[in-house]
Amino acid sequence: MAKGTFIRTSNVKPFIVDRNYSSKMLLDKFNSESKGIQLNEGTLGPGCSTPGAAHMAPHDEIYYVIKGEAVLTMDGVKYEIAPGDVIYIPCETFHSLDNKSDTDDFVLMTIWPEHPAEGANEVYDMRLKAWGKSYETLDGK
């Protein structure tokens, strides 16, 4: 029987992608007995945007907005998104984000129903290359 996992998100080390975006891997196969699901907290700085991506099949993604407002562009259609919104992004769907605020961070959870294969998620791959793992706490564990 698999054991449950408790994560104190304030103790998870953020992976700084660039001055615009940071990512905290909260749950995946490296810190739990999860066989598939992956949960990440992404923070997009004030006035910043992501270049966008389309994840290869079969890697769908789900967004759950925690804080702030942004414009999500998905397959050329723009959506105004805010806390509490849920977005399903099918694999191979181009998507990008623009933080609408010039003063506040935009924070969302990204959920993958399976662990990404190499090449499916650029940020995940960058973290693995830099750290040798996807999850690290501020105290180095």
Image (cartoon, grey):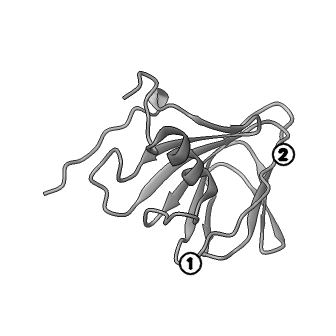
Estimate the x, y position of residue 31 in percent, counting from the top left.
34, 44
- Write down the quadrant of residue 64 in the picture: bottom right
- Left or right of 48, for residue 129: left
- Write down the quadrant of residue 102 in the picture: top right
- Left or right of 54, for residue 13: left
* Mark 1 to mark 2 CA distance (whole Å): 30 Å
Residue found 43% across the figure and 66% down from its top:
114
Of badges 1 and 2, nearer the viewer stands 1
Mark identifier at residue 10: none
Mark identifier at residue 100: 2
Residue found 77% across the figure and 52% down from its top:
50
Would residue 109 be seen by someone viewing this image from the given angle? Answer: no
Q: Looking at this view, is 94 or 77 the one in front?
A: 94
Instruction: Name which residue type carries label 2.
Output: Lys
Quadrant of the image for the C terminus? top left
- Left or right of 140, for residue 23: right
Is residue 87 shown above or below 12? Answer: below
Quadrant of the image for the N terminus? bottom left
Is residue 112 shown above or below 12? Answer: below
Estimate the x, y position of residue 129 in percent, counting from the top left.
54, 46
Which residue is under mark 1? 57
Name the element at disc 2: loop
Instruction: Name which residue type carries label 1.
Output: Ala
Q: Looking at this view, is 68 or 58 the one in front?
A: 58
Name the element at disc 1: loop
Is residue 137 shown above or below 79? Answer: above
- Outermost residue toward the top in this view: 139
Q: Looking at this view, is 128 or 48 the one in front?
A: 128
